[in-house]
Image (spheres, rainbow, N blue to C red):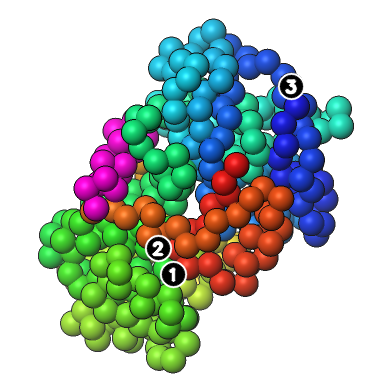
Amino acid sequence: MRTKAAIDVGYGQRLVVDELEVPDPRPDQVLVKLFSSGICHSQLHQMHNSDAPRPMVLGHEGTGVVTHVGANVTHLKEGDHAIVTWVPRTPVRGRSAPENSGVTYREEPVHGSVYTWGEDVLVSGELVIPISKDDPVDVSSIVGCAILTGAGAVMHTAKVRPGNSVAVFGVGGVGLSAIRMAAILEAYPIIAVDLKDDKLEFAKEFGATHVVNGSKVNAVEAVVDISGGGVDFAFDAIGVRATNEQILPSTRGGGPGADNHGGMAVLIGIPGDEMTLDPRLFVIHQRQFRGSLGATYPETDFPMYLRWHREGKFPLDKLITRRYKLDEINEACDALHAGEIMGRAIIEY
């Protein structure tokens, strides 16, 4: 079959919206006709990577209806509504080698093990999670990346508890998800750090109790002052070198002793190649710095997030501030690159 998708055909070129050739699913694959897809900043990293193999398909969070099921897939059936994600439903150890989906473009293999910037998605069944047909088919798409990444870092990686202090650097879709989860877990204070006042005001709607504009003040000093010596947990939801280097000194210090630990810095955003940290922050204050990559249990967490949305605890609809059609994907990427999108944007098919 043929389906329309956004295709990266060359470094530095605009995405092309054209037809892919989609084969029948392998035994471990499913085919999903999408209703919607999130537009994630990670795709900009892929597009700006001159070494990425092309042609390449993009996107890794979407909601659709299952139209074909491979012979070995048992948790899905045709007609199911489901979220397409990038985190396997079966827990794994280490990193597995990605396998291209098998779709082609003009008879050339297309790179990418998962994609959601397309009308029909051929993907491993491990990356497809069934949801209720009562769940919304538009806003649920961002559960597949933005929510699981930000909220999962707070809940599973840091294991934030009531009364812990939290700072989140960067309040896009992932950062706002982290803030909302911190609020649900009754952290205090919850400090949002960004460079734009309108985004910081928006963060208050998701549970930020304090805001810091890093373009006007020293962000680290402000966080330390607000929290009375540094936060228990600081999250970098951007990934640029400046914020990589700011989150650890924003946490509280510890000292000598078996259980006199300092705070934890958690890197969520995709980083560059280098950063510089003072090693004394680790040893003298027993601080911790760790990464978080899709910290979620999809089969249990996804229904939980969707239930919280129905209950008004996790407002997915408020998090989505712009909607595009597939033919407008370059316009959407331009807006995302320019920092014009508050929260998350989605594609609707």
Horizontal side of residue 143 vs 271, given as left or right: left
Q: Around disc 2, counting alpha carbons within 10 Å, would you say few (fewer than 14), some (14 to 19), or many (20 or more)?
A: many
1 and 3 marks in contact (CB < 8 Å)? no
Between the residue at mark 1 and the residue at mark 3, the CA separation in whole angstroms equals: 41 Å
Q: Around disc 3, counting alpha carbons within 10 Å, would you say few (fewer than 14), some (14 to 19), or many (20 or more)?
A: few
For the N terminus, the image quarter is top right
| Amino acid on which disc 3 is placed | Met
| Amino acid on which disc 1 is placed | Gly
The foreground one among 303 and 28 is 303
Percent coordinates x, y for residue 122 in the rendering: 62, 26
The magenta stretch is 298-312
Horizontal side of residue 169 vs 253, given as left or right: right
> At 53% from the left edge and 67% from the top edge, which residue is drawn?
341
| Amino acid on which disc 2 is placed | Gly
2 and 1 marks in contact (CB < 8 Å)? yes
**Disc with the residue nearer the chain's start (2 vs 1):** 1
Report which residue position mark 2 lands on: 175
> At 76% from the left edge and 52% from the top edge, which residue is drawn?
15
Report which residue position mark 3 lands on: 1
Q: Quadrant of residue 56?
A: top right
Image position of 74 with respect to 160: above or below:
above
For the C terminus, the image quarter is top right
